[in-house]
Image: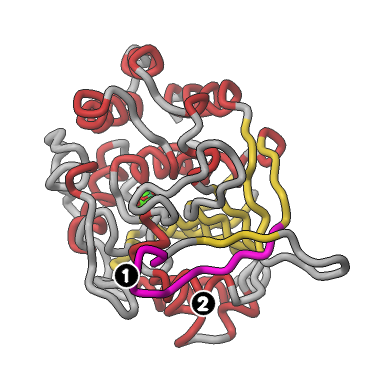
Amino acid sequence: MEKVILDMDPGIDDALALLLAISSPELAIQGVSTVAGNTVVEKTGINARRVLEYVGRGEVPVYYGSSSPMARPLSTAEHFHGSDGLGEAGIPMPRQPPIPGGVQFIAETVAKNPNDITIITTGPLTNVALAFTLYPRTLRLVKRLVVMGGAYHLTPYGRGNVTPFSEFNIYTDPEAANIVFNSSVPITCVGLDISTDPSVKIDRRRYEEIRGLRGKKAELASRIMKYQLERFGEVEVHDALAVAAALRPEIFQTVEMRVQVLTNNDASRGATIAVKPREGEKGNAKICTGVDGEKFFELLLSRLSDPG
Ligand code: RIB
Ligand code: CA
């Protein structure tokens, strides 16, 4: 079992990632820290609780993390996730609120489990960067990061979704991403290069397959995905792919690169520049350049359907 912290900004695809993670016995989830991104942290925190309680997993602790990027005003994405951040699907509000102190939770959990915690991030990297900055032993003791973020131009799908160069999670807090990519912590990146590949998207056919499954997880997934399916004709599952990268690395292809995050205030804001390391030089990230889309969907389907 891999001990993991999920750092998220639910968000429709974050919610799918959370459902996949809690349905995977390979992962020992220590808790969820939430961050401002797709919507404000008050909502991302509550949304993680909504998802967990809806499927009877209210015992998983959820923490509020950062309410804003490190050095920029917050820009959210409600147009893509709905005004409540969960597709306006009427999912009941939680009985239990999130707990304050998400950054401290990350630092304390890593300190208590030296070299044994994987942090899977599916939102802006603010919480992780603050944990590395305010509690420096965190970056020395964390085992690895799996980051949904970046657009590396390594496949035909590797262009940005905020600007042609920048992906939302990195664009929202480029200073935090810069700290994380320069931390020397082992990072596997799931970027738009594979997460916007048509082979991994949920189209109408795949949506109906999920909707046809029995159980609360599949019901919740189809209810929240409907928002994007109706407006955009498909559902992007960036974050669930990051969880799959932790669960099934064998269905992904990766390349080791040296990544630099641009923190300018112009069109290059949040760009992730990836170059091959020089001979004998180590890269700072393994970037996913391919995935078996069918195997990913089979994994998602099987985990959403099992009553566990
Ligand atoms: O660019 C896609 C990422 O931004 C996903 O994590 C999505 O949830 C949004 O946070
Ligand atoms: Ca997200």
Which residue is rendered at x = 68% and y = 70% of the image?
115
Task: Relative to 202, say whether 47 is above or below.
Answer: below
> Mark 1 falls on what kind of element?
loop
Residue 3 is at least partly visible in this image = yes
Q: Does the magenta-highlighted stretch encompass residue 245?
A: no
Q: Earlier in the sequence, mark 2 or mark 1?
A: 1
Could you tell me the amino acid type at mark 2? Answer: Ile
Q: Position of residue 4 (x, y in %)?
A: 54, 57
Quickly name the residue at label 1. 65
Whole-Å distance between the Cαs marked 2 and 1? 17 Å
Left or right: where 115 falls relative to 33:
right
Task: Relative to 117, say whether 231 is above or below.
Answer: above
In magenta, the rendered stretch is: 257-269
Q: Position of residue 227 (x, y in %)?
A: 20, 31
Ligand 1 within 8 Å of disc 2? The answer is no
Q: Does the magenta-highlighted stretch encompass residue 267?
A: yes
Quickly name the residue at label 2. 179
- What is the number of the mark on residue 303? none
> Mark 2 falls on what kind of element?
helix
Could you tell me the amino acid type at mark 1? Answer: Gly
Magenta stretch: dominant secondary structure: loop
Which residue is rendered at x = 36% and y = 53% of the image?
163
